[in-house]
Image (cartoon, rainbow, N blue to C red):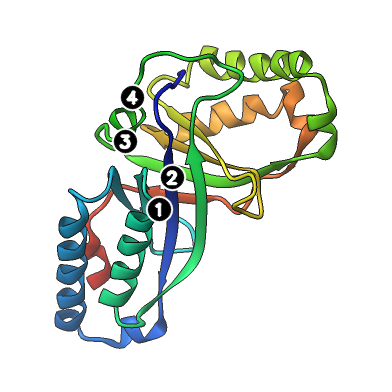
């Protein structure tokens, strides 16, 4: 999908509950869960987009994906959530990036925030990525040819239907160059697409793409178990 219009900043935040959280009574944890809901509600009209997931990996419990044109709004939400939980969570991972049109896919009239604010799909995947120095020394047309193959293989894969992808940029603002984000309807089909993409030429220039965050849409009351 091609994007054009003003770019937006993004946080992907993975929060992990401390041991103290699990020592609280169910009623006490329920009060904090209600407070988190109030914080989210108070920021819905301040931020361009807020989406929340329950983590499927051990590098977090709650995952937030938030986007806005103003970085101050992102930080206000971030610290409001942390403050509301009174030291019962820590940030295990935080990815900061900027979503803008890709130099390889051209432009259309799609509005970025409208695209991001679609109803969330069941699964969420995000990871940072960095490419080798040699990649940037290649002529642009050669890089475009390599990326065209990558894009075409992904789009033509029979299991790619419904997957939304977001390549976001972190040059100069992160210890990585990109944060790659996906919204996914079926995780097993996603695995098939990724396995196929391991065979494309672009893999030669990937320096790293980890750690991976994986989440699933779900109710926070799972944390009262």
Which secondary structure, mark 4? Answer: loop
- Reading the image, the residue beneath label 4 is 111
Q: Give the alpha-carbon distance from disc 3 to disc 2, as whole Å.
A: 21 Å
In the rendered image, is residue 63 in sight? Answer: no
| Labelled disc at residue 9 | 2
Label 4 CA crowd tier, 10 Å (few <14, some 14–19, many 20+) = few
Occupied quadrant, residue 43: bottom left
Label 1 CA crowd tier, 10 Å (few <14, some 14–19, many 20+) = some
- Reading the image, the residue beneath label 1 is 71
Q: Give the alpha-carbon distance from disc 4 to disc 1, as whole Å.
A: 19 Å
Q: Earlier in the sequence, mark 4 or mark 2?
A: 2
Q: Quick check: 147 above or below 49?
A: above
Image-based side of 32 in relation to 74, left or right: left
Q: Mark 4 near mark 3, Cβ–Cβ under 8 Å?
A: no
Quarter occupied by the C terminus:
bottom left
| Labelled disc at residue 121 | 3
Q: Give the alpha-carbon distance from disc 4 to disc 2, as whole Å.
A: 14 Å
């Amino acid at each position: 999908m091609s994007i054009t219009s003003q770019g937006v900043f993004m946080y992907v935040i993975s929060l992990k509950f401390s041991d103290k959280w699990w020592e609280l009574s169910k009623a006490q944890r329920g009060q904090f869960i209600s407070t988190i809901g109030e914080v989210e509600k108070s920021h819905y009209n301040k931020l361009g987009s807020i989406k929340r997931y329950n983590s499927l990996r051990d590098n977090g419990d709650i995952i937030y994906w938030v986007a806005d044109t103003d970085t101050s709004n992102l930080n206000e939400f971030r610290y409001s959530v942390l403050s509301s939980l009174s030291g019962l969570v820590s940030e295990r991972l935080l990815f900061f990036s900027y979503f803008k049109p890709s130099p390889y896919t051209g432009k259309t009239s799609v509005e970025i925030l409208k695209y991001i604010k679609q109803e969330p799909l069941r699964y969420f995947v995000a990871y940072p990525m960095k490419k080798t120095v040699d990649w940037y020394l290649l002529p642009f047309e050669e890089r475009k040819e390599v990326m065209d193959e990558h894009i075409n293989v992904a789009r033509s894969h029979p299991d790619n239907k419904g997957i939304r992808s977001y390549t976001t940029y972190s040059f100069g603002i992160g210890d990585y160059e990109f944060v790659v984000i996906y919204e996914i309807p079926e995780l097993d089909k996603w695995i098939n697409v990724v396995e196929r993409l391991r065979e494309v030429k672009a893999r030669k220039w990937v320096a790293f793409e980890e750690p991976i965050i994986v989440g699933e849409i779900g109710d926070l009351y799972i944390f009262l178990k």
